[in-house]
Image (cartoon, coloured by chain):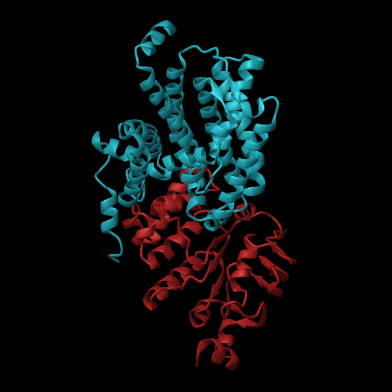
């Protein structure tokens, strides 16, 4: 089985394989940040730093403990989640811009710590040994993507997910409904970081080399762009946003030095024409239910039409 | 049922409440009236735990509830309709009501209660799949009240239910409040519209800069010359 899959992977052009894997990792990271920023409404600029915690933990677990990759990813995810909870407890009482600045500060601290620790090889970065895995890594990445999408959907539709979404809508009203706002914010932050940790672990093993500078402010902004471009709070949005932002820079390569100019312009145009994100107003499950005839036709346009006729 | 004893609340250097005391008995509607900034909303927010007390004590059904977290106060049976309605804008009417019953886990009871609220507010039933942000102000106020009832409170705190509503809608909302009270609900009402508040409350407290300057039966306050000139505009 493993050999067959490996054979399959070998037939894919390595360049495309890398784009494919990067998109997958992007989706995992975006889904995580989407829980924090999209669902709970807490702007975090530190997702890249959580990714680095996962990446370094995962690399060290492979080199020091030699755990199989699946277990390794779970452990790295947990380490990242714990770190996020510890950071989150004091700062999640803040909101909006203040919270964003705090997450930015912590992200820098984390980067500086990794740049100065012997165990992470300081500024030289770590070379990551190939992990012990039951399937080739690119396949594993996409297994994790599918698993993450399923889990995120369950979370969104759970009691916990609805409490998070109430917090995003109105913290005071949520508190008045008996929701423990700060506690849920910390849990959501930790959960989002778990995804970042897993994504970081996959990134470390796929790349084979990690450096603290790979996970700076720009990485966090990249992930945030995926969430915003796709649509805040939308799972399909995170998938589309992460894929578009991972693939677009590659497809624009033929433009040589104009590439990033066009890429930036593309972002601006999308946000002007789809301010709620690419998938912002689309409820995929509803479309699906309607397509198979399980739900009467009722779309956002009907809702708009009802506005203010009272 | 509810006793507020000598409450002090500070916002930084500003003293919002200066030794306010009051009692609310089972089955009553008690109104807190007064000008903007008199501390009316602060009183409700301190009861529901959203604002910390600098001093004083709140007891509810024999338990001290001052200093405990808001989610535990909801569980003790106090539910608040916050000022400005604060419905969950991106959720449907139905989802808003479900959030109101967040602390409950009896899904059968919740469904029944939602049906009961739809019977009381037919407007909401017609719009149950609509996003609450698309409702009119009056409908949003009905939704906010319905949502607060979903936790099955024994005491309902209403903060400015008439705010921003047309006079006809204000009448309608107050009729609903009276009906809810007739069903046995104890209500503590904060209102700027003093005449409406006095018309449905059994007793009222008049607030000025963080303390009550006058209290008594609504009927007496409504004919009090000072109240009439300051709050009823006659």
- Residue A23, picture quadrant: top left
Q: Residue furthest front?
A: A257
Q: Is residue A62 left or right of residue B165?
A: right
Please name the residue shown 64% across and 52% down the image: B72
Closest to the observer, B105 or A41: A41
Q: Residue furthest right?
A: B55
Is residue B211 placed above or below A248 in the rendered structure?
A: below
**Where's the C terminus of chain A, which quadrant?**
bottom left
**Where residue A182 appears, x then y in whole percent?**
61, 49
Q: Is residue A149 left or right of residue A256?
A: right
Is residue A301 placed above or below B30 in the rendered structure?
A: above
Q: Which colour is chain A painted? A: cyan
Please name the residue shown 58% across and 60% down the image: B154
- For the image, the number of numbered tags is 0
Asked if residue B113 can be seen in this view, the reply is: no
Please name the residue shown 58% across and 88% down the image: B227
Asked if residue A91 can be seen in this view, the reply is: yes
Is residue A274 placed above or below A252 in the rendered structure?
A: below
**Where residue A245 appears, x then y in whole percent?**
38, 36
**Where's the N terminus of chain A, which quadrant?**
top left
Please name the residue shown 36% across and 22% down the image: A16
**Where residue B6 appears, x then y in whole percent?**
74, 72
Closest to the observer, A68 or B199: A68
**Where residue A281 appears, x then y in whole percent?**
33, 47
Q: Which colour is chain B painted? A: red
């Amino acid at each position: 089985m493993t050999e067959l899959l490996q054979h399959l992977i070998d037939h894919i052009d390595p360049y495309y394989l890398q784009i494919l894997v990067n998109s997958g990792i992007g989706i995992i990271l975006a889904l995580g940040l989407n829980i924090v920023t999209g669902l709970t409404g807490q702007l975090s600029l530190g997702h890249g730093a959580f990714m680095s915690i996962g990446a370094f933990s995962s690399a060290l677990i492979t080199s020091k403990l030699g755990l199989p990759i699946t277990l390794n990813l779970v452990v790295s995810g947990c380490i990242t989640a714990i770190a996020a909870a510890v950071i989150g407890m004091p700062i999640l009482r803040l909101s909006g811009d203040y919270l964003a600045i705090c997450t930015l500060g912590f992200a820098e601290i984390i980067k500086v710590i990794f740049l100065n620790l012997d165990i992470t090889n300081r500024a030289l970065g770590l070379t990551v040994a190939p992990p012990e895995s039951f399937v080739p890594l690119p396949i594993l990445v996409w297994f994790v993507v599918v698993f993450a999408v399923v889990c995120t959907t369950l979370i969104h539709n759970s009691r916990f997910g609805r409490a998070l979404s109430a917090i995003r809508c109105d913290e005071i009203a949520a508190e008045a409904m008996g929701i423990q706002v700060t506690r849920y914010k910390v849990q959501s932050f930790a959960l989002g970081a778990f995804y970042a940790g897993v994504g970081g672990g996959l990134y470390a093993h796929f790349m084979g080399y990690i450096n603290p500078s790979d996970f700076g402010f720009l990485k966090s902004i990249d992930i945030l762009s995926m969430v915003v471009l796709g649509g805040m709070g939308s799972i399909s949005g995170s998938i589309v946003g992460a894929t578009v932002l991972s693939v677009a820079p590659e497809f624009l390569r033929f433009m040589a030095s104009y590439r990033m100019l066009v890429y930036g312009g593309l972002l601006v145009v999308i946000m002007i024409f789809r301010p709620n994100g690419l998938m912002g107003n689309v409820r995929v499950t509803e479309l699906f239910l309607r397509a198979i005839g399980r739900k009467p036709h009722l779309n956002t346009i009907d809702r708009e039409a009802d506005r203010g006729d009272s | 049922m509810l006793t507020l004893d000598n409450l002090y609340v500070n916002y930084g250097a500003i003293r919002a409440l200066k030794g306010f005391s009051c009692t609310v008995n089972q089955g009553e509607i008690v109104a807190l009236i007064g000008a903007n900034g008199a501390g009316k909303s602060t009183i409700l927010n301190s009861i529901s735990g959203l604002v910390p007390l600098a001093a004083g004590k709140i007891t509810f059904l024999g338990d001290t509830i001052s200093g405990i977290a808001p989610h535990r106060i909801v569980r003790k049976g106090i539910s608040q309709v916050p000022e400005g309605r604060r419905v969950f804008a991106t959720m449907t009417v139905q989802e808003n009501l479900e959030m109101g019953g967040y602390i409950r886990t009896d899904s059968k009871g919740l469904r029944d209660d939602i049906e009961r609220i739809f019977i009381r507010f037919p407007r909401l039933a017609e719009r149950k799949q609509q996003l609450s942000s698309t409702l009119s102000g009056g409908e949003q106020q009905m939704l906010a009240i319905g949502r607060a009832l979903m936790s099955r409170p024994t005491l309902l705190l209403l903060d400015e239910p008439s705010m921003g509503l047309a006079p006809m809608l204000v009448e309608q909302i107050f009729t609903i409040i009276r009906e809810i009270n007739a069903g046995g609900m104890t209500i503590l009402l904060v209102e700027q519209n003093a005449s409406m508040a006095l018309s449905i409350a059994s007793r009222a407290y008049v607030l000025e800069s963080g303390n009550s300057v006058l209290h008594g039966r609504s009927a007496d306050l409504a004919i009090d010359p000072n109240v009439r000139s300051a709050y009823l505009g006659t």
